[in-house]
Amino acid sequence: MRKTWVIIFIMLYSVVQAQIVPIPDSQFKSRLLASSPSNPIAKNQYSVGIKVDVNNDGQIQVTEAQAVVYLDLTTDLITNLSGLSYFSNIKELYNGNGTLTSVTISLPKLEYLIVGGNAMTALDISACPKLDKMVLRYNGPTLSLSNNSVKTITLTGGSNLQNINLQGFTALKDFTLQQGSNVQSVNGSNMPSLESAFLSYAPVLSQINFTGSPNFKSLSVITTGLPSLDLTNYTSLETVAAQVNTFSTVKLDGCTSLLKAMLYDNTISNSNISMNGANALETLFLKQCNLTSLALNNLPSLKHVDLSDNHITNLNLSNLPSLEKLNLTSNLLSSLDLTNTVSIKTLISSHNKLSNLNVAPLTQLMNLQCDYNALIQLDLSNNKNLSQLTCHNNPNLEQIFLKNGGRQYSAFMQIYPNPKLQYICCDDQSELMDFIDYTSANGNPNTIVNSYCYFTPGNAIYTIQGNIKYDSDNNGCDSNDPGKGFQRFTITSGNNTGTIITNDSGNYVLPVQEGSHTIKPVLENPYFTVTPASYTVTFPAQTTPVTQNFCLAANGIHHDLETVIIPLTAAAPGFDSKYKIIYKNKGTASQSGNINFTFNDDLMNYLNATTVPDSQSTGTLHWNFTNLLPFEKREIILTFKLNSPTQSPALNSGDVLSYNAQIIGATDETPADNNFILNQTVVNSFDPNDKTCLEGTSITQTQIGDYVHYLIRFENTGTANARNILVKDVIDTSKFDLATLVPLDASHTFVTKITNPNVVEFVFDNIQLPFNDAHNDGYISFKIKTKSTLVSGSNFSNTAKIYFDYNAPVITNTYTTSVEGTLATAEVKNDKYTIGIYPNPVQNVLYIKSSDEVIKAEIYDTAGRLINSMGTKGNTADVSNLSKGNYWIKLFLKDKTTLQKFIKN
C-alpha cells in the first residue's frame, strides 16, 4: 500500500512539473510573481487584482496563467516575452516596453493591446484574431502590419518612422497618429471599413491617401506639413478638420456628403478654396486663415459660417438660402451685403469697419452683435424676432430704431457705451418704459426714448423739440415753474400713431421725416387743461428744429381725495401684521384734513406707525395732514400684533379682520373713495404668490357697479435676483368693466399694459428682486368696477399668472367673491326670546344678552350695506367708530343668525 502512494505522488509531481509555464526572462517572471490584489499587475475576469502564483511555489502553472484576463508588463527590464502565449485568456495587454526591439504576440482572446517603445522595430500580431483596439509606439522606418480584426489604432511614431501603410488592417475603422515627428506619408487607400483618421503633430507629413475607402467619413489634420488639402471626390467624407497648417490650396470639390469643414489657423490663399458640388455642407469654419477676400456661392444647405479673425475686406455671399449663423468678428469689412442670406438668425460682425449695416432682409434675426464698428445709425425696424443686441463702442452711433412689433428687453441689450447716442425708438408700453429706465441707469438720461419712428432711417431727419411745465402759480408757464416729468404724448402721422414720454425734466426731442405730424398731450383726468391742446408741424415747409413747449394748468377748483388700505403681510394668529394706508390728492387744489383708522382692539394690539398718530383711542387712530398738493401721494405703514388662538378672545384661521380708513377734507367730488373697508381673512399658512379681493369673499347688492380692489403678491423663491417680473391678469369682461381699471400701488416701479383685448400685464422691468427672505417680496394693487348687470347670487373670480424672468408662470389661487342681497325682510325681526342688545340707543359699547354663544357680529347700514365685521369678546360689540344713525347688527350663533336694530348716538 505504501508503495502505491509513492507511485501516485511521483506521477502527480511529474504532471505538475509538466504544466509549469516556461518563462526564460527572469524580469518577466518576477513581474508576474509580484502581482497581488494590492499590486494588480494581473487581473481576473472580474477586473480584480489577483496573485498569479496561487500555490506559492515560485513558478507559474498553465492553470494559473489561464486565470489572467488583464496583464500589465510595463517595464523597461523585460527583454524576452517567451511564455506569454500560455496566458491564452488575456483580453487586455499593456506592454509599454522601451527595450524590446521585436515583439510577437499570439493570444487568441486578446481584444485591447498597448505595445511598443523607442526600440521596437518589428511587431507581429497576426495570431490575435479577436484584437479590436491597439495603441502602438513604433520606431521602424515603415509600419506595414496585417490583422483582420483590429478596428482602432492609436500610433505614436518613433524618430525613425517615416511611412505608414494601413492596408493590412482590413477591419480598421479609426486611425490616430500622434506626434509622428518624421512621418512623411500615410496610406489608407482602398480600405473597406476605414471611417476616420486623426493625424496630428506630424510636421513633415506631405502625403496622405484615403481614396477608394468607401466608408471614410472623418478626417482631422492638425499641425502637419501638408502643402495642400486635396480631398476631391471623397464622396463619403462627412467631416474635415484642419488646424495650424500651411495649405496653399483647399479642394473639397465633389464631396457630396460633406457636412462640416472646420479649418482653423491655416494659411490659405483666397483664390484656392473650392467647394463645387458640396451641396450637403452645413457648417464651414475658416478662422484665422489670413483671408483677405472670399466668395461663398451655391451652397444650398450651409447653415453656419465662421470667418472670424481674418483680414477680409471683400465678402461675396450668394445663393445661401439656409444660412442661419454668420460670424465675421475681427475682419476689415467696411460694407456687407446680406440681400441673399435672408434666413440668418445670428449675425456677429463685431470688430470691423462698418459704417452702415442693412439687416432689413433678415426678418428671422434673433441675435445681432455689431459692437466696435463705425455705425452711425442702426435700423432694426424689420427684425421683430430680435431678442439679443450688442452694439456698444460704435463711437459715431446716434440713432437706434427698435420699434418692430416684437418685444425687446434691455436686460438682453448691450448698447452702452456709445457717446453720441441721442435717440432710441422702440415699441410702446412696457418696452418704452424699460428703455427709459435702461438709458437712465447707464448714465445717459439725455438719450431720448420714444415709440415714434415713422420714417425710413437714412432719409432727411427733421426735429421737433420742447418741454412741458406745470403752471403752479396760475400766471402762465415760465422758467420758475417745474417741468412735468414723464408726461405722455401721442404723435400721429397719417395712419401711424406712436407714444413718447418726456424725460424727468419735461424735455423732449422728436426726430421725424418729411410730412405732417401732430403732437398731443394725454391727460390723466379732466381737472387740467394743456396749452396748446395739440400741435401740428409740417416738414420741409417749416425749418428744423421746431421748438414747441406745452403748459399744464388747473381747470378750476376740484377737490378729490382718495384713501385705500393695502395689507402688506398675511394675517396670521400670534404674529405681527402690517398695513399701508395710502391717501392722495387727485384734484387741483392743495388740501388739509384728517384720517381716521379703526380696528378691533380686542383682537390685536397696535404697535407702531411710520407717522405717529396725532391722537388715538381704543380701536381708533387719528392723523391730521396739511398741504397735500395736487398729484401728491402719501403713505402710513401700521404694525399690529394679532391675538393668538390661546388668547381671549382667540383669533383663529378663517376669522375675518375688518379695518376702516376714512379721509376727510373739503367737500369731495367723488366721496365714495373717501372711505375704505378692508376685510382680511386670517390664515395659519399662506402661498407667497397669491391674489385677494380686499372687500372679502362677498359684497352686497348695493355695491354692484362700484370699485372692488385687488392685491396680487409675489415672492422670489429662487436662488438669484429676479431681473424682470410680469404679472398677467386676464379680466372677465362679462363681470368687470375693463375701462375702469386703475393701478393703485406697488412695491416697485411698474408699468401697465392692456392687450388682446382683456389681458392686463403689470410689468416690473429690471426690478432685480432679491432672493434673500428679508427682501424678496413684492405686490401690485389695482381697482376695477364690476358690471352693473350683476345680480344677487352672482359671483366673480380672478386669477393671475406671475412670470419671474423667463421661467414658467406661477399661477395664483382663484379668488371668488359673491354678491349677497341686502338684508332680506325675513331677516329683519327681533328674536327677543333668545337674545337681546343694550343699551339702545348706544354710544360706545353694545352689550349682547344671549343664552347661546355669539361667534361674531356684522353691522349693516339701513341700505343693507356691510359696514363692519367683528368678534364679540365678552358678548360686546364696539360701535364707537360709527356715525350717528340707525343700524342693523347681525349676530352669528352656533346654528343660526339673528338681527337686531339699534340707534347710534
Image: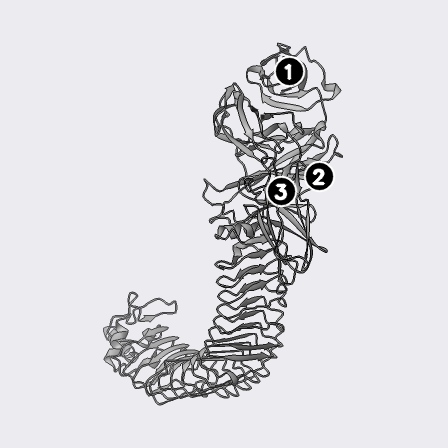
The amino acid sitting under disc 2 is Asp
| Residue 884 numbered mark, or none | 1
In the rendered structure, the answer to whether residue 380 lies left or right of residue 771 reads right
Q: Which residue is mark 2?
A: 737
Residue sitting nearer the eye, 332 or 258: 332
Question: Residue at left 63%, top 77%?
Answer: 319
Judging depth in this view, the residue of 6 and 741 nearest the camera is 741
Question: Please, what secondary structure does the residue beneath circle 2 have?
Answer: strand
Q: Residue at x 52, y 18 (%)?
A: 618
- Amino acid type at mark 1: Lys
Q: Secondary structure at mark 1?
A: loop
Q: How is the image coloured?
A: one colour
| Image-based side of 169 in relation to 405, left or right | left
Where does label 3 land, which residue? Answer: 551
Answer yes or no: is residue 90 visible: no
Q: Earlier in the sequence, mark 2 or mark 1?
A: 2
The answer to which of marks 3 and 2 sits earlier in the sequence is 3
* Residue 669 located left or right of residue 503: right
Instruction: Locate residue 646, reporting x and y percent.
Output: 49, 23
Across and down, in percent, residue 117 comes to: 31, 81
Q: CA distance from mark 2 to mark 1?
A: 34 Å
Quarter of the figure that contains the C terminus = top right
